[in-house]
């Protein structure tokens, strides 16, 4: 931190100080060799405060923290098959875009139409989420899952099924098993 006072070093209520906070950046470490070179140029970690160590990690290209920082993609081996997945298979294969009525293609965690309209997909049923406020967000992987009320509505409207025949929604994410935040 670089501090520059406009009025000298005497601080009084009618005098205000002036501070500048400057940040630098480092590229993420790519190899052990580069890590050693960076370590020689850096301030030793023992001399930094806890806050300083945190800033160095955040802005200095620190490694991922398991359970705190996550990548946007979920490993397919972690995907848990749910009863809703097979129940909504026919609807999923025939879903169309709400904007242009073209057929949706499921690609990983997204559904995309030929006009490049993109929608998130439900981790439990695989259906495209095409309206706001009808899904929940996982606290761990940030993926979405349709609410049970929306799944029931879709089953009645498109599959002409009894609402009680819809498999119950789980309290856990279909992709990683995490809890929902909303």
Image (cartoon, rainbow, N blue to C red):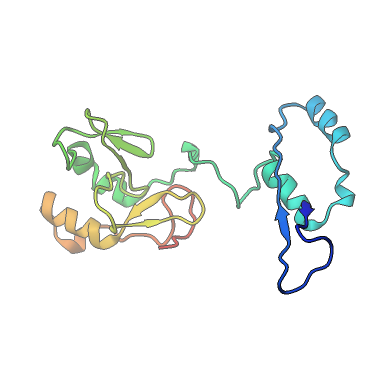
Whether residue 159 is visible: no
Left or right of residue 113: residue 6: right
Left or right of residue 87: residue 141: right
Task: Give the image location of residue 84, x and y in percent.
Answer: 30, 51
Left or right of residue 178: residue 31: right
In the depicted structure, whether residue 127 falls above or below residue 17: above
Residue visible at 66% across and 47% down in the picture:
65
In the current view of this chain or complex, which residue is farthest to the bottom? 13
Task: Give the image location of residue 92, x and y in percent.
Answer: 23, 41
- Residue 26 versus residue 94: which sits nearer the camera? 26
Q: Quadrant of residue 134?
A: bottom left
Task: Give the image location of residue 139, x and y in percent.
Answer: 49, 57
Q: Quadrant of residue 116?
A: top left
- Quadrant for the C terminus, please: bottom left
Residue visible at 30% across and 48% down in the picture:
125
Q: Quadrant of residue 109?
A: top left
Task: Give the image location of residue 133, x and y in percent.
Answer: 29, 59
Whether residue 58 is visible: yes
Left or right of residue 34: residue 161: left
Residue visible at 37% across and 47% down in the picture:
123
Residue visible at 35% across and 50% down in the picture:
124
Number of labels in the image equals: 0
């Amino acid at each position: 931190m670089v501090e520059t006072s406009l009025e000298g070093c005497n601080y009084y209520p009618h005098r205000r100080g002036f501070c500048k906070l400057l940040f630098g950046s480092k590229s993420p470490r790519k190899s052990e060799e580069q890590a050693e070179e960076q370590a020689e140029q850096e301030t030793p970690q023992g001399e930094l405060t806890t806050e300083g160590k945190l800033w160095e990690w955040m802005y200095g290209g620190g490694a991922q923290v398991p359970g705190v920082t996550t990548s946007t993609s979920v490993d397919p081996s972690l995907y848990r098959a749910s009863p809703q997945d097979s129940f909504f298979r026919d609807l999923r294969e025939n879903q169309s875009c709400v904007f242009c009525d073209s057929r949706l293609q499921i690609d990983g965690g997204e559904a995309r139409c030929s006009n490049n309209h993109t929608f998130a997909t439900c981790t439990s049923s695989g259906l495209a989420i095409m309206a706001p406020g009808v899904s929940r967000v996982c606290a761990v992987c940030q993926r979405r899952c349709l609410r049970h009320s929306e799944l029931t509505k879709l089953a009645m409207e498109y599959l002409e099924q009894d609402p009680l025949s819809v498999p119950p929604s789980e309290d856990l994410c279909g992709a990683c098993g995490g809890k929902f935040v909303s």
